[in-house]
Image (tube, grey):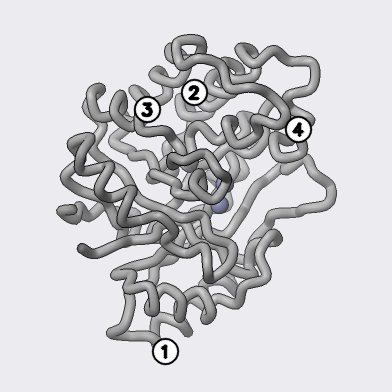
Amino acid sequence: MAFYDYHVHSCFSEDSNAPMVDMVQAGIEKGLAEMCFCDHVDFGYTDPGFAFLCDVEKQQEEIAFCQQKYDGQITIKKGLEIGLQPHVLQQYEDFLPQYEFDFILASMHTCQQKDIHTGAYFAGKTAKDAYCDYFDSFLTCLKQFKNYNCLGHLDILKRYGNHIKEPDYEVYQEGLEAVLKQVIVDGKGIEVNTSGFRHGKGAPYPSYAILKRYKELGGEMITTGSDAHTPQDLAIHFSQTYAALKEIGFCYVCTFLNRKPYMHKI
Ligand SMILES: [Zn+2]
Ligand SMILES: [Zn+2]
């Protein structure tokens, strides 16, 4: 079965030291049919230690170099992982048309202008508020912003169980499902991010229960991504995840070319 890793970082992301060629070579060794570099552009990111502003011009030059060097061995695509926040959406509308991309992954790493990774967002919040506010904010963004293809690691909050305990699904179900419905209505998709296995969660982001619900609501479009920042993490737990997706009832995973989806039978 062919595998497609649609969430790959390289040293064009501030939190990765991996040269792009190393990531591509690992992709070839691991037998990937295709990989998409989604380096970070996160406008208004609140941690002063990280700028998360990929130099897209240089990143795309390096992608073009790799496409030529590894032609016939693997397909390489031009993507970005952007960080949504309601007050920076116009910045993305101005920024994205300056380049040509195959794929835009929209994630939320910051909520209410507070960093999730450092735990600042969770301070003084109940688990219910933390989860509900997160999905409310996501929905606010998606109602205005359509310049993306898939949503990244939808239930990433569960990664930060050291800051806040994950509430029962029913607690945040309404907010989360409103996001899923918006994605479906807009003809967009969600990613299945296997870094959850790396983080000891025993499941991807989002969880299989959420993926099942997405399918029930009519969701078809999914990409698979490892969120690898190092060559060894590329395509991690893909065979297991693809098998689980088939079991849930997904028949296809998506790849993108010039922002248009292509469905591949799994
Ligand atoms: Zn992310
Ligand atoms: Zn990422």
Looking at the image, residue 106 sits to the left or right of residue 253; the answer is right
The residue that label 4 is drawn on is 119
Image quarter of the N terminus: bottom left
Q: Give coordinates of residue 226: x percent, y percent.
A: 46, 55
Using a 10 Å C-alpha cutoff, classify the residue at mark 1 as few (fewer than 14 neighbours), some (14 to 19) or many (20 or more). Answer: few
Q: Which of marks 2 and 3 is nearer the N terminus?
A: 2
Q: Give coordinates of residue 231: x percent, y percent.
A: 53, 71
Q: Which of marks 4 and 1 is nearer the N terminus?
A: 1
For numbered disc 2, what is the local secondary structure?
A: helix
For the point 29% across and 28% down, the residue is 212
The amino acid type, in three-letter code, at marker 4 is Gly
Q: Which of marks 4 and 3 is nearer the N terminus?
A: 4
For numbered disc 3, what is the local secondary structure?
A: helix
Q: Distance between the residues labelled 4 and 3?
A: 24 Å
The residue that label 1 is drawn on is 69
Q: Nearer the viewer, mark 4 or mark 2?
A: 4
Q: Determine whether 67 is above or below 250 in the image.
A: below
Using a 10 Å C-alpha cutoff, classify the residue at mark 2 as few (fewer than 14 neighbours), some (14 to 19) or many (20 or more). Answer: many
Q: How far apart are marks 2 and 1 (CA)?
A: 41 Å
The residue that label 2 is drawn on is 139
Cβ atoms at labels 4 and 1 below 8 Å apart: no
Mark yes or no: residue 142 visible: yes
Q: Give coordinates of residue 221: x percent, y percent.
A: 27, 41
Residue 118's disc number? none
Looking at the image, residue 242 sits to the left or right of residue 27; the answer is left
Residue 210's disc number? 3
Q: Determine whether 141 is above or below 92 in the image.
A: above
Q: In terms of depth relative to the viewer, which is nearer, 169 or 223?
A: 169
The amino acid type, in three-letter code, at marker 2 is Leu
